[in-house]
Image (cartoon, helix red, strand yellow):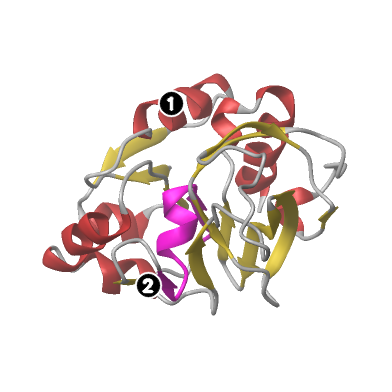
């Protein structure tokens, strides 16, 4: 059984639907015992970092998430919350990945506005991919992104995307995996990512 973490962040239903299309049994829950007992855990989310972290801390889910030993996949806000700190409302996050989350800059070093729009919305490929989550994925394959904040490049990066600047589009450490993009909205390439996670 796969559990999808229920907390005050959106996009949970689309993840649930994507798993059902793959024939996977899943349960959306915030019950600690069911989360601990799951074969795999998905930590999705679209929302704001500080309110999401406050919700997790108030329910002890921050400690629970860090203690999990089965495969865990963070998606979008889920990836950002698994990092050390987010510039979004100066938020201390879970610290699973030793990586800072920053807001895309509006201007370049010369003070000129970037031609790319913020938030980053749409399809982008990668400059590099590696690791178990990205097995069989070519850097040229497009994934769907929606975000204004990005995880910096770090030693735990398994995928790098370049939008305004290079950032960590995928992370991996021990049993923890993360994707800044939305595999559940990324057609066939995203389905490969989810299948890879289900096979870990």
* 27 relative position to 125: left or right: left
Q: Of residues 53 and 29, which is closer to you in this image?
A: 53
Locate residue 130, reporting x and y percent. Answer: 81, 59
The residue lying at 64 percent from left, 53 percent from top is 112
Task: Tell me the magenta residue range.
Answer: 70-86
Occupied quadrant, residue 50: bottom left
Check the image and report above or below for 197 versus 102. Answer: above
Q: What residue does disc 2 label?
A: 94
Q: What SS does tag 1 mark?
A: helix
Classify mark 2: residues with Cα within 10 Å, few (<14), some (14-19) or many (20+): many
Residue shown at 64% from the left, 46% from the top: 114
Whether 128 is among the magenta residues is: no
Q: Is residue 81 magenta?
A: yes
Answer with mark 1 or mark 2, whichever residue precedes in sequence: 1
The spot of residue 83 in percent (x, y) is 47, 70
Left or right of residue 27: residue 107: right
The residue shown at (42%, 29%) is 16
Residue, disc 1 = 14
Mark 2: which secondary structure? loop
Asked if the residue at tag 2 contacts the one at tag 1, i.e. Cβ–Cβ closer than 8 Å, the answer is no
Q: Any mark on residue 30, and which?
A: none
Q: Quadrant of the C terminus?
A: bottom right
Residue 60 percent across, percent down from the top left: 18, 69
Q: CA distance from mark 1 to mark 2?
A: 24 Å
């Amino acid at each position: 059984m796969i559990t999808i973490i229920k907390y005050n962040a959106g996009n949970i239903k689309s993840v649930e639907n994507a798993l059902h299309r793959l024939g996977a049994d899943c349960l959306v829950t915030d019950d600690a015992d069911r989360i601990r007992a799951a074969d795999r855990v998905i930590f999705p989310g679209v929302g704001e970092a500080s309110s999401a972290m406050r919700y997790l801390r108030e329910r002890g889910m921050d400690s629970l998430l860090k203690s999990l030993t089965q495969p865990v996949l963070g998606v979008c806000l889920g990836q950002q919350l698994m990092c050390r700190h987010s510039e979004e409302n100066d938020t201390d996050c879970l610290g699973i990945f030793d990586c800072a989350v920053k807001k895309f800059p509006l201007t370049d070093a010369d003070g000129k506005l970037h031609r790319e729009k913020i938030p980053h919305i749409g399809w982008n490929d990668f400059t590099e991919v590696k690791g178990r989550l990205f097995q069989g994925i070519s850097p040229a394959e497009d994934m769907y992104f929606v975000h204004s904040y990005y995880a910096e490049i770090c030693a735990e990066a398994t995928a790098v995307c370049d939008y305004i600047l290079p950032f960590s589009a995928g992370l991996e450490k021990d049993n923890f995996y993360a994707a800044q993009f939305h595999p559940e909205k990324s057609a066939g390439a995203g389905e490969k990512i989810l299948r890879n996670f289900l096979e870990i």
